[in-house]
Image: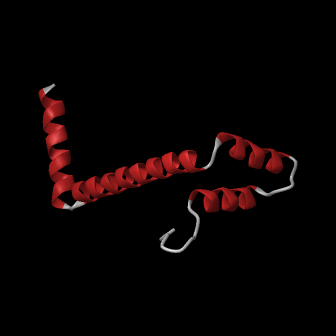
Amino acid sequence: VPELVATLGRHVTFLTERGLLERRRRRRLGERIEALVEARARVRYHGKVPAARREEILSQVETRALTPAEAARILYEEAWPQGPGDEG
């Protein structure tokens, strides 16, 4: 165990001296922030677009009346309408 602790210590020193530890931390923080934004967007989407509407659009994709990209655009616009004063 002492050898493992020493090896880990040397590795942390190596990462710190080269700025790699800070880059990793920054990357993880960025990923966490994006995950939180995505979670909030998902909550808004589910709150603004009823399940029945989502199912209706999904059925249209299944029958190829809409492409997945068209469905996504429609649902996005319903969750985030571009009205006056709405920043999108």
Name the residue nearer the viewer: 39 or 43: 43
Furthest toward the top, the residue is: 1
Task: Return the residue nearer the eye: 12 or 82.
Answer: 82
65 vs 48, nearest the viewer: 48
Residue drawn at (48%, 73%), measured in percent from left and top?
A: 85
* Relative to 57, 85 lies left or right: left
Q: Is residue 3 left or right of residue 50?
A: left
Horizontal relation, residue 79 to residue 63: left or right: left
Name the residue: 71% across, 41% down.
52
Q: Is 2 above or below relative to 87?
A: above
Residue furthest out toward the bottom: 84
- At 63% from the left and 58% from the top, the residue drawn is 78
Picture quadrant of residue 6: top left
| Towards the viewer: 15 or 49 | 49
Query: Which quadrant of the structure image shows residue 37?
Result: bottom left
Q: How is the image coloured?
A: secondary structure
**Residue lying farthest front?**
84
- Residue 11, given in percent of the width and then of the height, sits at 20, 46
Q: Residue 76: x, y in percent? A: 62, 59
Q: Position of residue 51 (x, y in %)?
A: 66, 40
Q: Residue at x 51, y 68 (%)?
A: 88
Residue 24 point in image, percent of width and height = 29, 54
